[in-house]
Amino acid sequence: MLDQLTGNERVKSLLRRMLETRRVPGAMLFTGEDGVGKKLFALELAKALNCRTPQGVEGCGRCPACRRTDKFNDPQSSDADDWKGIIWTDHPDVGMVVAPKRLLLVEQMRLVEREANYRPYEGNARVFLIEDADKLNEASANALLKVLEEPPHTSHIVLLTSHPDMLLPTIRSRCQMIRFSPVSPAEIEAHLLQNKIASPDEARIRARVARGSLGRAIAGGFDDYVRQRDSMLRVLKALAVSDDRLQLLRSAEEFNDARYKDEYESRLEILEALIRDAWLLSLHAPAEGVVNEDLLPELKKIGERLDSRRPADWISQIEELREQLVVNINRKAATDALLLTMAAAAPPLEKRRFQPR
Ligand SMILES: [Zn+2]
């Protein structure tokens, strides 16, 4: 049932309307941040189409058809060759393709086309999910065009992506686009509590730092998050309070440490969120807007010492670096430059303190 999914009420009503009027498009594009539920909604749609004991127009979630739709038979190995086929669920009419490496392949799209042209084996409809559809290149996108244009009325192809702008216009124009919104912190918190995923204190923090992604809030790694945040808090203190260049050098080294390679982007994101929080508090804004609410006393202290002209510069410098990450840049040089530029804007604290009013 759609009601059991968290968030995106507008999308739920839209899908219900499609089901009620029996106008579920053959080609759909689900867009929105990672972890907002695009895949779960697509599977719920598949259940609604194939359920044996539907509740109204929706899947019951309990019959064998619904239950099997939830179970993907992922290949056991990480060998790219094993991921080149359709990954079927236990339901013979519901499957998914994922990029084996960086791209979705022409042969995968031909497979989808071929399978989409078969009549359903068991249910009323065949449903194919294409995960990270932004990984279609020109060749694989072209291989998919024909079936997107006129899929058999019993087949539905759902493209999922958090980067719709990266799709070719020819693909976008053939799909009905459905936009997913970020899930609100309140909805995420309620979900974590109802499903006993986190204690009340932890749920509150997780919900706030997940930036609208339920998936991110659920995924483990909360301890990792806290560790990274501690480290970024040291950077912010060195910048805003102590003007501690040595600490900044150490932080730059940590940023570039091979062990933390995969954390690079999330560290930048966390640093940015901490800066925004301290900035908000320096302006005496209400604390509700603060993401890292559990650090309130500490962030307030930083906010009091913060020269309010600086955070905007810092944030734009971080954003600039994050944009450059899309292309291959020398991260070490970029991090050193970032921290130096951020520090450079800081007049030494002592001078500030003795400035005439
Ligand atoms: Zn069912």
Image (cartoon, grey):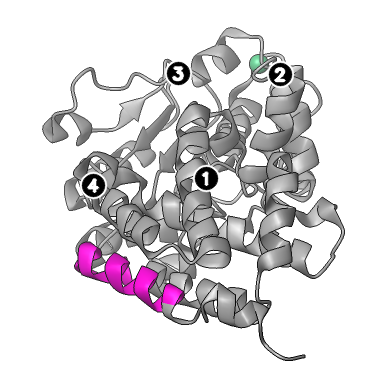
Q: Amino acid at mark 4?
A: Asp
Query: Which residue does the numbered mark 4 point to in the structure image?
Result: 257
Q: Give the spatial CA distance, label 4 vs label 3.
A: 45 Å
Assess whether residue 341 is covered by the magenta stretch: yes
Q: Which mark is residue 91?
A: 3
Q: Which residue type carries mark 3?
A: His
Left or right: where does residue 313 sit relative to residue 212?
left
Q: Earlier in the sequence, mark 2 or mark 3?
A: 3
Mark 1 or mark 3: which comes first in sequence? Answer: 3
Mark closest to the chain's N terminus, 4 or 1: 1
Nearest to viewer (mark 2 / mark 3): 2
* Mark closer to the observer (4, 3): 4
Ligand 1 lies in quarter: top right
The type of residue carrying mark 1 is: His
Image quarter for residue 19? top right
Q: Nearer the viewer, residue 43 or 54?
A: 43
Q: Position of residue 217 (x, y in %)?
A: 59, 34
Q: Secondary structure at mark 3?
A: loop
Q: CA distance from mark 2 to mark 1?
A: 47 Å
| Callout in the foreground (4, 2) | 4
What is the spatial separation of the Cα atoms under label 1 and label 3, in whole angstroms?
19 Å
Residue 153 got which mark?
Answer: 1
Could you give the CA–CA distance between mark 4 and mark 2, rounded to whole angstroms?
Answer: 32 Å
SS label for mark 2: loop
Question: Does any portion of residue 176 appear in the rendered image?
Answer: no
Asked which secondary structure carries label 1, the reply is loop
Q: Name the kind of residue labelled 2 in the image.
A: Ser
In x, y percent, where is residue 274? Answer: 60, 56
